Amino acid sequence: MKRTANAHWNGTLQEGKGEITTQSTILNKTQYSFKTRFADGVGTNPEELIAAAHAGCFTMAVGAALSQAGITPGDLTTDAILDLDMQALEIKGIHLELKASLIDGVDEAKFKEVAEGAKAGCIVSKALSVPITLNVTYA
């Protein structure tokens, strides 16, 4: 299976602009620029897209891991916070903040164990070489 995206850029770093399109076309010529990446502009940026991909992948992985353990998942919501070091121009890490509804018969220790396994097994987690942290709110 292959998944694709396309990016187009025209102009200098600070004055140029670009567009990102995904295979599904959910992003279709979505604008990005210096301002959307490093300031406040309208559009998206690569780091935001990495965070979105990680949040989506991890949340699905938690649901899958619970299901595989014979547990019916409840509501799962993940915020992925990507730490971009502007001095070094590198991603320093991603923090996953998972909020999950209580599941009858599943204690917090078991839920956290499943979530940690999902963090390690998530396809996007495995693709990233940066430290990936996780915090779980299970209530």
Image (cartoon, rainbow, N blue to C red):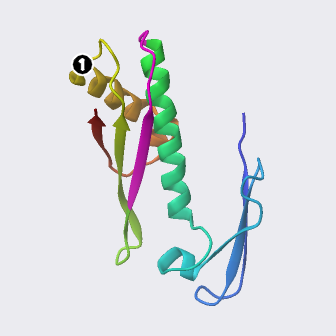
Near-viewer residue (53 or 136): 136
Q: Which residue is nearer to you in this view: 131 or 18?
A: 18
**Helix, strand or loop under label 1:** loop
Side (left or right) of 82 relative to 39: left
The magenta stretch is 69-82
Does 75 lie within the magenta span?
Answer: yes
Q: Is residue 9 left or right of residue 104?
A: right
Relative to 8, is 139 on the left or the right? left
Residue 2 horizontal/vertical position (percent): 72, 39
Q: Residue at x 60, y 67 (%)?
A: 44
Q: Is residue 35 magenta?
A: no
Disc 1: which residue: 107
Give, as a three-letter code, the residue at label 1. Asp
Q: Rate crowding at label 1 as few (under 14), some (14 to 19) or many (20 or more) other CA atoms within 10 Å.
A: few
Please name whichever residue, 137 or 128, is drawn nearer the observer in this view of the structure.
Answer: 137
The N terminus lies in quadrant:
top right
Residue name at image x 55 percent, y 82 percent: 35
Q: Is residue 12 left or right of residue 64?
A: right
Q: Please report the residue visible at 60 percent of the width from the left and 85 percent of the height from the top.
A: 13
Horizontal and vertical percent position of residue 12: 65, 88
Residue 123, position as x, y percentages in the image: 51, 36
For this rendering, which residue is in front, 119 or 67? 67
- How many numbered dots are placed on residues in this image? 1
Image quarter of residue 86: bottom left
Query: Is the residue 2 above or below the residue 65 in the image?
Result: below
Q: Is residue 23 above or below residue 90?
A: above
Above or below for 10 versus 131: below
